[in-house]
């Protein structure tokens, strides 16, 4: 059997793949957080709950209306994104003029409400969501067995991340977004409808979280608390990467997933805390984050 | 000249009258606290006192230094576990256990503080939350915490080897003394020159720096003091309930203490006490009603409503009202 640093190759690559999948979710979620933070200057504490809503939307669409995975992949982010638009329009907009820390507190309250409601409806034990037929099974790559759905998650996440990067950095709409991040008052003076832009941005970021939820539904069990612990890890990822750049958020997410996966191979006891340890080291060595500019 | 003198004496007189009113209020509240266990269930009152101290400690940081910590549960749990572990395994008196627990939280607070004050605002909140989550996972895996079960049946013992704390009434007066110690320490800190500098940092940190203050040291000291008092609350709580559990280390607890402080009034002395009383009473009432499963949802709704319409909190709104109408 081939060994890599004293570990069987199959186990090594298996954990690397799991790490890459986790990293894909970290990247998607921290990307959404960064997009929202850029324009609204708030940290969306409901992001984990909205990721969970995405998974539940897919689950409920299948259970009640028989709508399949492929449609849900588009429909669920739109439904949850629309919910985000309502939240921005009727709640977050009222507190734009005060300290942005209140945005964090308000979205924390929302997260409690959403998670609590779903816990009452569905209980804490998770529900299963089947892997779509076309993505079942796996391929033997010779050095490891690759389940197709897991490869699919990584591929979709990478494509979506690239698309978002392209949208923000290379299109006119993205130009507005970046300009609004720099100076939204000036944008308004130039005749851009900034409040609308803010609403849509929040909805978009929420939609990204929901997309992550749909992708996660077949691999993790769909449960009300699936988002809350994940979100705290994503916060650490955001601190490590800094929210200055889109590319930074994506790369840091993937990197931290891999670090976590490798820790599972060599020292499993530390795998739940390794990302926090990396955060501590980054804070000591480079407080503004790997890709951050200033504090 | 004469007019300014009379003005000054008038101002002094009104200040004196205000002080007199304040001391009268303190005396009435203290009298109430002393007779409370004779009419209400002492264990619930002790719970309120522990959480009131916890909220006051948290408020020292948010209300006076302007730092939102989302990781204070870690200090509550550290104090609690340390005290619980010592009292369960060694024949020491409760006050030694509580002091050691508080010291453990102080050490952890120094570590958290050094790391987290390197960033500001929203990052500060995220860092403290992440660090506290790390501590949560460590306590989940460690042996001395009892994992998911926690430490149960911690003996209350005899205070100073003399007073039997298994008597709820004696226990109550001890907890009241601990609370008053913490509360008065915070009150003195806030009104000291140190507290004034903290407020200056809260209002405008670059300006405080330009005036020559090393703001990092001030923030760190405030953080450590806050963590120590949160640990004191946790240690005392463990002795009262004879239990230290993972729930104390969970992020949910950090959120709850923020809510208590926010509802009562951030940056007011009595706000956190009132907020803790309100939230705990509400939770207690709800858990016995048909809404028992909806406690989290209701707390979340209160969070949203307070942030949208009631940011000064109960005490803050009362102060505003008094200023407007009785000046």
Image (cartoon, grey):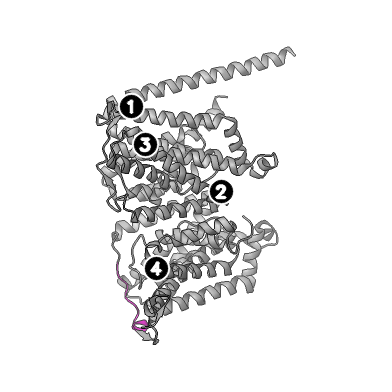
Query: In front: mark 4 or mark 2?
Result: 4
Q: Which residue is mark 1?
A: B173
Magenta stretch: give its range.
Answer: A127-137
| B161 within the magenta span | no
Q: Which residue is mark 2?
A: B117
Tag 3, which chain?
B
Query: Label 4, label 1: how many angstroms apart (C-alpha)?
Result: 50 Å
Front residue of this view, candidates B91 and B22? B91
Direction from residue B153 to residue A233 in the image, left or right? right
Query: Label 1, label 3: how many angstroms apart (C-alpha)?
Result: 16 Å
What mark, if any, has residue A264 been given in the picture? 4
Direction from residue B236 to residue B119 in the image, left or right? right
Tag 4, which chain?
A
In the rendered image, residue B59, in percent from the top left (x then y), is placed at 48, 39
Secondary structure, mark 1, is: helix
Query: Label 3, label 2: how many angstroms apart (C-alpha)?
Result: 27 Å
Query: In front: mark 4 or mark 1?
Result: 4
Pointers 4 and 2 within a single chain: no
Label 2 close to label 1 by CB (< 8 Å)? no
Query: In front: mark 3 or mark 2?
Result: 3
In the rendered image, residue A53, in percent from the top left (x then y), is placed at 40, 64
In this rendering, is residue B136 above or below B214?
A: below
Tag 2, which chain?
B
Q: Which residue is mark 3?
A: B98
Label 4 close to label 2 by CB (< 8 Å)? no
Query: Label 3, label 4: how many angstroms apart (C-alpha)?
Result: 37 Å
In this rendering, is residue A260 above or below B317?
A: below
Secondary structure, mark 3, is: helix
Secondary structure mostly seen in magenta is loop
Tag 1, which chain?
B
């Amino acid at each position: 059997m081939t060994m890599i640093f004293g570990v069987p190759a199959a186990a090594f690559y298996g954990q690397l793949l799991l790490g890459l999948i986790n990293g894909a979710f970290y990247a998607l979620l921290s990307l959404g957080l960064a997009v929202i933070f850029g324009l609204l200057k708030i940290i969306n504490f409901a992001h984990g709950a909205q990721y969970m809503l995405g998974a539940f939307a897919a689950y409920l669409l299948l259970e009640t209306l028989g709508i399949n995975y492929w449609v849900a992949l588009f429909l669920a982010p739109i439904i949850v994104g629309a919910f985000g638009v309502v939240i921005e329009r009727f709640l977050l907009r009222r507190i734009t003029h005060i300290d942005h820390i209140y945005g964090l507190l308000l979205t924390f309250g929302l997260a409690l409400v959403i998670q609590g409601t779903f816990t009452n409806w569905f209980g804490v034990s998770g529900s299963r969501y089947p892997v779509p037929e076309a993505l079942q099974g796996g391929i033997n790559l010779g050095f490891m067995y690759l389940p197709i759905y897991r490869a699919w998650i990584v591929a979709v996440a990478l494509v979506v991340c690239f698309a978002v990067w392209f949208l923000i950095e290379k299109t006119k709409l993205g130009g507005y977004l970046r300009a609004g991040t720099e100076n939204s008052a000036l944008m308004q003076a130039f005749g851009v409808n900034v409040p609308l832009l803010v609403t849509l941005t929040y909805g978009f970021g929420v939609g990204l979280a929901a997309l992550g939820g749909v992708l996660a539904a077949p691999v993790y069990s769909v449960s009300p608390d699936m988002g809350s612990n994940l979100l705290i890890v994503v916060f650490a990822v955001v601190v490590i990467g800094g929210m200055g750049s889109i590319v930074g958020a994506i790369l840091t997410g993937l990197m931290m997933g891999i670090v976590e996966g490798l820790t599972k191979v060599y020292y499993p006891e530390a795998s739940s805390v390794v990302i926090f340890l990396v955060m501590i080291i980054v804070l000591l060595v480079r407080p503004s984050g790997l890709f951050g500019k200033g504090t | 000249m004469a007019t300014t003198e009379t003005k000054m004496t008038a101002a002094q007189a009104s200040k004196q009258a205000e002080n007199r009113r304040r001391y009268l209020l303190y005396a009435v509240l203290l009298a109430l606290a002393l007779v409370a266990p004779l009419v209400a269930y002492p264990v619930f009152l002790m719970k309120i006192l522990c959480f009131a101290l916890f909220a006051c400690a948290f408020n020292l940081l948010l209300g006076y230094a302007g730092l939102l910590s989302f990781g204070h549960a870690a200090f509550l749990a550290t104090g609690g576990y340390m005290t619980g572990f010592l009292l369960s395994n060694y024949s020491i008196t409760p006050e030694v256990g509580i002091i050691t627990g508080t010291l453990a939280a102080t050490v952890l607070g120094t570590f958290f503080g050094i790391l987290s004050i390197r960033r500001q605002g929203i990052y500060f909140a995220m860092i403290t939350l992440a660090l506290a989550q790390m501590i949560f996972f460590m306590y989940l895996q460690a042996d001395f915490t009892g994992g998911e079960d926690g430490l149960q049946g911690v003996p209350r013992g005899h205070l100073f080897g003399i007073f039997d704390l298994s008597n709820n009434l004696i226990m109550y007066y001890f907890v009241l003394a601990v609370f008053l110690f913490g509360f008065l320490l915070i009150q003195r800190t806030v009104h000291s020159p140190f507290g004034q500098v903290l407020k200056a940092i809260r209002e405008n940190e670059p300006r405080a720096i330009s005036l020559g203050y090393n703001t990092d040291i001030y923030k760190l000291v405030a953080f450590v003091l806050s963590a120590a008092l949160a640990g004191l609350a946790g240690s005392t709580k463990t002795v009262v309930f004879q239990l230290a559990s993972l729930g104390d280390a969970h992020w949910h607890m950090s959120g709850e203490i923020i809510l208590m402080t926010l509802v009562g009034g951030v940056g007011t002395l009595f706000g956190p006490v009132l907020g803790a009383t309100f939230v705990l009473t509400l939770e207690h009432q709800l858990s016995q009603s048909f809404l028992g499963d909806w406690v989290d949802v209701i707390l979340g709704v209160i969070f949203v409503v307070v942030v949208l319409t009631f940011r000064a909190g109960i005490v803050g709104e009362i102060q505003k009202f008094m200023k407007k109408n009785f000046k």
